[in-house]
Image (cartoon, rainbow, N blue to C red):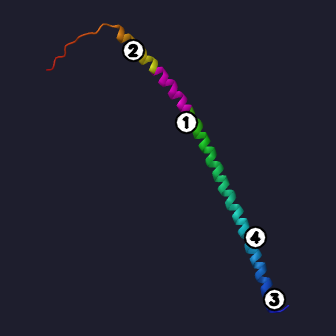
Amino acid sequence: PSPQAEERILKKVRRKIRNKQSAQDSRRRKKEYLDGLESRAAACSAQNQELRKKVQELEKLNGSLLQQLQALITRTSNKAAQTGTCVLV
């Protein structure tokens, strides 16, 4: 083969090697990206569970406080109105 033909074959082989390396790099980057997304999704799911639990606890506390408030209002409304004197010194 002539030197020009050898040069073309060599360029073709080099291009195939570069393409192969580029494809491997692309697959590696994609895998890293997906691993990162999976990790973030797991962290968000865990945080979501914690927040749901916190909301339940706060709703329960809110209900309890509401009952206490209603009981207090009922008790105070049953008492006769008291008059008082305030002295400012």
Helix, strand, or loop for circle 3? helix
Specify whether residue 23 is painted magenta: no
Q: Amino acid at mark 3?
A: Ala
The quarter of the picture where the C terminus appears is top left
| Mark with earlier residue (3, 4) | 3
Helix, strand, or loop for circle 1? helix
Specify whether residue 56 is painted magenta: yes
Comparing labels 4 and 2, the label whose residue is closer to the camera:
2
Q: Amino acid at mark 1?
A: Leu
Residue linked to disc 1: 51
Residue at (69, 64) in percent of width and height? 26
Relative to 72, 37 lies left or right? right
Q: Position of residue 8 (x, y in %)?
A: 78, 85
How far apart in space, not on screen, are marks 1 and 2 (Cα)? Answer: 31 Å
Relative to 30, 66 lies left or right? left
Residue linked to disc 3: 5
Magenta segment, principal secondary structure? helix
Q: Amino acid at mark 4?
A: Lys
Check if mark 1's residue and mark 2's residue have beta carbons within 8 Å.
no
How far apart in space, not on screen, are marks 4 and 2 (Cα)? Answer: 77 Å
How far apart in space, not on screen, are marks 4 and 1 (Cα)? Answer: 46 Å
Relative to 81, 2 lies left or right? right
Magenta-drawn segment: 53-65
Q: How busy is the neighbourhood of tag 2: few (under 14 within 10 Å), some, or many (20 plus)?
A: few
Q: How busy is the neighbourhood of tag 3: few (under 14 within 10 Å), some, or many (20 plus)?
A: few
| Mark with earlier residue (1, 2) | 1
Residue at (30, 7) in percent of width and height? 80
Residue linked to disc 2: 72
Give the mark count. 4
